[in-house]
Image (tube, grey):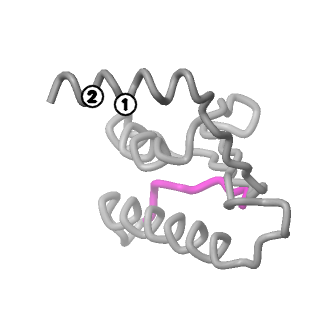
Amino acid sequence: MKKTFKLTHPKIKVARLIESIKNEVRKYLKRERRKNLPEDADFWDFNCKFGETEKSAAVIHVDDITKNIDQAESKKLESFYLEIIAKTGHRSKKPKEIASTVLDDTIMTS
């Protein structure tokens, strides 16, 4: 999804536009995550960019999309650009030494 969302409309209030944009983003993420994974992948990951324009868009994490949309509303922007591209993700295992020390620390502090 590569889209510029407008936050101005003659009849619809900004708060309703924000909610509809967030809903559209959630639906898109759900739809992409439902797609079949290739055999070598563990999960669907996303490359995301957010900015006032396509040229000024900066890389963000998926979890920060709604925060950035809320910031755009608080800054009273007329529009913003959002890009979400699905990619395959691969889980990485923690090294055994680090995992065991973290586990030991949590047992001792409990």
Tell which of 65 and 81 is nearer to you: 65
The x and y percentages for residue 86 are 74, 58
Labelled disc at residue 106 = 2
Local SS, label 1 = helix
Give the vertical position of 93 relative to 35 (above or below): above
Tell which of 95 and 1 is nearer to you: 95
Labelled disc at residue 61 = none
Give the left or right position of residue 4, taking residue 78 as reference: right
Mark 1 and mark 2 in contact (Cβ < 8 Å)?
Answer: yes
Tell which of 11 and 37 is nearer to you: 37
Task: Specify the quadrant that holds the N terminus.
Answer: bottom right
Which residue is label 1 attached to? 103
Q: Residues within 10 Å of mark 1 (few under 14, many from 20)?
A: few
Residue positioned most to the left: 110
Tell which of 58 and 108 is nearer to you: 108
Three-letter code for the amino acid on which mark 2 is drawn: Thr
User: Residue at horizontal 59%, vertical 35%?
Assistant: 60
Task: Specify the quadrant that holds the C terminus.
Answer: top left
User: Residue at horizontal 32%, vertical 38%?
Assistant: 74
* Quarter assignment of residue 88: bottom right
The x and y percentages for residue 40 are 85, 61
Q: How far is the residue under mark 2 from the one under mark 1?
A: 5 Å
- The residue stretch that appears in magenta: 1-9
